[in-house]
Image (cartoon, rainbow, N blue to C red):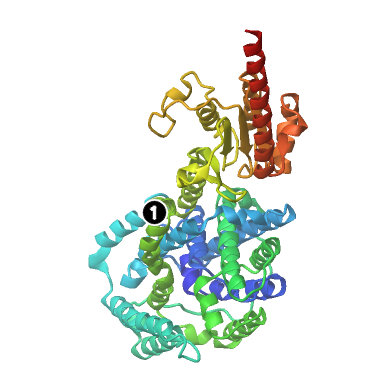
């Protein structure tokens, strides 16, 4: 019910979203420990779409009929968003696009959830203070909401402020106790349930809704809504909202399922997860549910309580069913401020993800930068744009790192057949005239220039040759000319047309410079690309080797034969004189 307020729909639709999707995922999902249903990120993104398409009128209090019409329109938009995101995930399942979950890296997901936690906190401030403010959407909505709250602060309700303070004073310590004494408690303390009961009793006995105008949940309709196909005319308008929601749903659910699958030694099928979440969103939208996914807090709660299979979801469905059929009237006097406090307290785990930043800085500065850029973008812009910025920046870091890789000159470890980078040791053997190079990155249009410059320097093919400075180092003295070069392509995972043509041009330049070119450990895919680019017109199959050791042995034989030929020529010239 609390997350339903984030989605800008009446609280009862949060109960619907905690029943139908859980039931469907229990039948189709592969994550044994996942708990599905309402999730803060999706609720917030859905709420932004609802507020954009069905904004609340700026006039005073609405009549009962007008309020019902507004709620019906908003529920229709939220259901259409769920329908659209479910249809997109089913389309991804048909195309077997489960691999797309890998494009949302761990720093992006954690920064996204941490930034959303801040959005949730700020968006709940009006409810905590008893203020009726229009919801801000779009870029800089967080700062707009803060400004609106500060402006309206003198109009805040002391009664609702007191309820909020008391609720947080109970919920936050209980959350801490559940975390710190997780291993000692037989089951987590149900702080939210206790708070809901106490607040409802207090509001009923003190008539807070009439005496102090405290906003309450009101009547929860019993039973289930009639199945209704969402308004398909809305789909073009909500497509821009459904796509990021579908991606976030799948990414968060797949990553969470993978964490517990690794922990408990079983496997998940990412494409089957697409089917399960797509079907749960699409089918549940027929019952006026808003978008849903796996949830962090309730999944952790489920595991702590001893849940081991998808059957645990069926038991939670029974509890929600009992509320829908019989217990709904008991929530009539529940203050909405308590639901706002539950929303904020449930974000505890997401806020504390910032504690991992020092360790992330120590492990990888690049991942730290991805985390910070994503978080700042989510906070300052909005969830959709922030996610897009995070994914693009994360992919850019990968591309930039492939462009900064240098060719490594290899030498033979004494007494072995192993070849190691010369830069890392001074005890490696080198043969004059033989150059063994390793290129440990994909060869594509973005790295072809770096590949060419490195090879020109190592082989002396550039204008300045080896008397000039190395691309990333100081000036080096002239060495013996290279007569045989071995290229270790074991690190080249793929090559595009531009990269393949670069290798073909290198083979031509080596032949013109009387340098014997050998290729080693070239995988089948890369070799096929090079062949189609015309490499075998420049080299023979005898110049392709399975391993660096075989290529080096062949190169040593070539150098020995070449030295013998030159000695015989010199002796013949001496006799002639």
Q: Name the residue under label 1.
A: 372
Task: Count all numbered tags in the image, as a single digit.
Answer: 1
Residue 193 relative to residue 244: left or right: left
Taking depth in this image into account, of 324 and 83 the one nearest to the observer is 83
Q: In this view, does 514 lie above or below 210?
A: above
Quadrant of residue 522 within the rendered picture: top right
Q: Nearer the viewer, residue 96 or 221?
A: 96
Using the image, determine if residue 210 lies above or below residue 393.
below
- Identify the image quadrant of the C terminus: top right
| Residue 240 in view in this figure | yes
Q: Residue furthest right?
A: 541
How many C-alpha atoms fall within 10 Å of the one at disc 1: few (<14), some, or many (≥20)?
some
Q: Is mark 1 on a helix, strand or loop?
A: helix
Which residue sits at x=34%, y=67%? 125
Nearest the eye: 530 or 567: 567
Residue under the point 61% across and 85% down: 325
Residue 59 seen from this side: no
Q: Where is residue 351 in the image (x, y as percent from the top left)?
A: 39, 67
Indicate left or right for 232 with 427 as reference. right
Q: Is residue 251 left or right of residue 341?
A: right
Q: In which quarter of the image is residue 85?
A: bottom right
Q: Position of residue 510 (x, y in %)?
A: 62, 23
* Residue 180 rendering spot, x and y as whole percentages: 40, 83
User: Residue 523, position in %: x, y?
Assistant: 70, 43
**As rendered, which of 331 and 567 lies closer to the eye?**
567
């Amino acid at each position: 019910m609390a997350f339903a307020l984030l989605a800008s729909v009446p609280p009862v639709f949060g109960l619907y979203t905690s029943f139908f999707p859980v039931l469907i995922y229990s039948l189709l999902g592969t994550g044994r420990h996942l708990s599905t249903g309402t999730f803060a990120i999706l609720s917030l993104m859905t709420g932004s779409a609802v507020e954009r398409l069905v904004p609340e009128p700026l006039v005073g209090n609405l009549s009962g009929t007008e309020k019902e019409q507004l709620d019906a329109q908003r529920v229709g938009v939220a259901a259409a968003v769920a329908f659209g995101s479910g249809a997109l995930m089913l389309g991804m399942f048909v195309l077997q696009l489960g691999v797309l979950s890998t494009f949302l890296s761990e720093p992006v997901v954690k920064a996204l959830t941490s930034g959303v936690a801040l959005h949730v906190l700020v968006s709940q401030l009006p409810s905590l203070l008893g203020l009726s403010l229009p919801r801000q959407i779009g870029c800089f909505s967080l700062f707009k909401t803060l400004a609106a709250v500060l402006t309206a602060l003198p109009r805040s309700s002391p009664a609702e402020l007191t309820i909020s303070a008391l609720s947080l004073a109970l919920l936050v310590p209980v959350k801490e106790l559940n975390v710190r004494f997780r291993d000692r408690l037989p089951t987590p303390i149900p702080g939210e349930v206790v708070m809901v009961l106490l607040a409802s009793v207090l509001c009923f006995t003190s008539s807070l809704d009439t005496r102090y105008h405290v906003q309450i949940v009101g009547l929860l309709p019993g039973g289930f809504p009639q199945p209704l196909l969402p308004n398909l005319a809305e789909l073009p308008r909500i497509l821009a909202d459904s796509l990021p929601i579908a991606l976030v749903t799948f990414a968060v659910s797949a990553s969470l399922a993978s964490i517990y699958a690794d922990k408990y030694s079983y496997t998940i099928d990412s494409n089957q997860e697409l089917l399960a979440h797509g079907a749960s969103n699409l089918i549940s939208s027929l019952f006026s549910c808003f978008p849903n996914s796996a949830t962090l807090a309730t999944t952790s709660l489920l595991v702590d309580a001893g849940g081991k299979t998808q059957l645990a979801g069926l038991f939670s469905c029974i509890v929600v069913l009992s509320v829908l059929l019989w217990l709904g009237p008991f929530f009539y006097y529940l203050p909405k401020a308590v639901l706002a406090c539950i929303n904020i307290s449930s974000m505890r785990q997401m806020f504390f993800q910032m504690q991992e930043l020092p360790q992330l800085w120590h492990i990888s500065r690049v991942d730290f930068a991805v985390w910070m850029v994503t978080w700042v973008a989510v906070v300052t812009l909005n969830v959709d744009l922030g996610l897009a910025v995070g994914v693009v920046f994360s992919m850019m870091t990968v591309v930039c790192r492939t462009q900064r890789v240098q060719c490594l000159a290899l030498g033979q470890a004494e007494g072995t057949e192993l070849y190691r980078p010369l830069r890392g040791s001074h005890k490696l053997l080198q043969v004059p005239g033989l150059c063994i190079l390793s290129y440990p990155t994909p060869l594509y249009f973005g790295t072809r220039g770096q590949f060419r410059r490195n090879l020109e320097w190592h082989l002396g093919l550039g204008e300045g040759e080896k008397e000039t400075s190395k691309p990333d180092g100081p000036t080096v003295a002239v060495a013996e000319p290279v007569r045989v070069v071995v290229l270790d392509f074991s690190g080249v995972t793929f090559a595009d047309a531009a990269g393949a043509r670069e290798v073909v041009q290198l083979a031509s330049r080596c032949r013109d410079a009387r340098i014997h070119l050998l290729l080693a450990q070239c995988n089948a895919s890369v070799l096929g690309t090079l062949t189609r680019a015309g490499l075998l017109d420049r080299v023979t199959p005898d110049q392709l080797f399975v391993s660096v050791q075989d290529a080096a042995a062949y190169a040593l034989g070539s150098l020995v034969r070449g030295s013998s030929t030159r000695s015989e020529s010199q002796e013949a010239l001496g006799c002639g004189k």
